[in-house]
Amino acid sequence: MPGIVIVGVQWGDEGKGKATDLLGERTDWVVKFNGGNNAGHTVVIGDEKYALHLLPSGILSPGVIPVIGNGVVVDLEVLFGELEALNARGIDTSRLKISANAHIITQYHRTLDKVTERFLGKRMIGTTGRGIGPAYADKINRVGIRMQDLFDENILRQKVEGALDQKNHLLVKVFNRRAITVDEVVEDLLSYAPRLRSIVCDTSLLLNTALDDGDVVVFEGGQATMLDIDHGTYPFVTSSSATAGGAATGAGIGPNRLDRIVGIVKAYTTRVGSGPFPTELFDEQGEWLRSRGFEFGTTTGRPRRVGWYDAPITRYATRVNGITDLVLTKLDILTGLAEIPVCVAYDVDGERFDEVPVNQSDFHHATPILQYFSGWKQDISRARTFEDLPLEAQDYVLALEEMSGTRISVIGVGAARDAVIVRHDLID
Ligand code: IMP
């Protein structure tokens, strides 16, 4: 059962690290297949804390080969910043492999991300400002720069010229910025080439061979279903495929190599940036959830928007990803509430919707139809079996499971790495 995909169900920050940790020692490869340094996760090992934005979490486990697939956009300054910081702390990063087809985020992508957001004014997406959208736009427009271009100066120069031709008009005439020269970009990119020679390769071939050999390969999705470019709350989304299908295209493997699709879902909901969010709370209950759950962005530090659990979203994510197992995280954050509201359907201008509406305007107008569950007061962070949970917490989990249409295989009950209840093994 070697190919396992991990995807976020909601708008990101569901705590995917819990699932990666659980698979831990049994994992041979960890593959990042979408996004770039817009993600952010903090990994705690012993007394040491590591903040990673671009590198897959597998970089910290000596027995794991971390891979950055072709579906990722790579900021080379960030890449080497993270590698050097890890090396300085004695972590061996020499196992890292990056696809020759992965695209590069350059200085002009970062600049364009920021000026475009400013230009959009109140229609802004609320991006992380890391150049993600403009880099993917270039990929789709066929004017992107790929890893392999760094090894052929002539080709690189031609491609950068092609990319900057239009952009400089835009930067100077529309955004009132200075033009960016081909030389400065080429010189900057070439400075990384010698260090990339041993890292960049055909990762699709590597991964297919690994799967043929029966290795356990974990495909770690960045962002989440509701931020997916096709299936999320467009246009308030990221620019990549964050759903399970993205693992196949973004890593160069066939969809039939994916044996388990694990959806990570928080026991309540959060979102960063703009866009619809039906269960969002604006009152002191929201403040309570935010501070108890420590809901502040890892990449940008922004306070996250918070709200109750939204069952139609989990059902939707189960459908568009083909989720086989759910990992419910942060159940302990709800401890202490007298009753816990859950969104079971939406009211859209007087009409009931049991599923996520396909029309953007309907979703913007959706207000939650809530069902209330009894809360619990006991500390649950030491529960290790389902039966250790108070009956109210058990009922809450079983109700979510029924509404989601997939089994909840793992429940996160605390911040500690081992604070989980495993009901079904994620690899068997
Ligand atoms: P971008 O990915 O920087 O283009 O941002 C697009 C949207 O995705 C914004 O609303 C971001 O806040 C959101 N986003 C991107 N990465 C993450 C993440 O890792 N967690 C949560 N939200 C994210």
Image (cartoon, rainbow, N blue to C red):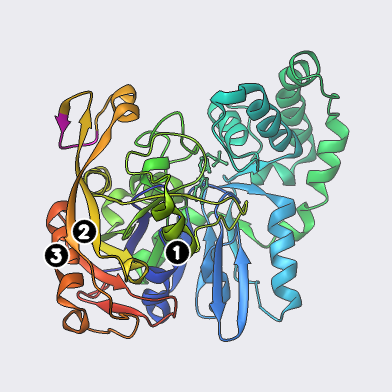
When asked about the image quadrant of residue 174, the answer is top right
Look at the magenta stretch and give its main secondary structure.
loop
Amino acid marked by disc 3? Leu
State the separation of the CA atoms marked 3 and 1. Answer: 22 Å
Query: Comparing marks 3 and 1, which lies closer to the viewer?
Result: 1
- Residue 296: x and y in percent read 55, 57
Q: Is residue 221 left or right of residue 427?
A: right
The disc at residue 398 is: 3
State the separation of the CA atoms marked 2 and 3. Answer: 16 Å
Q: Is residue 355 magenta?
A: yes
Label 3 sits on a secondary structure element that is helix
Which of disc 1 and disc 3 is earlier in sequence? 1
- Residue 338: x and y in percent read 25, 65
Amino acid marked by disc 1? Gly
Q: Is residue 245 magenta?
A: no
The residue segment tinted magenta is: 352-356
- Reading the image, the residue beneath label 2 is 324
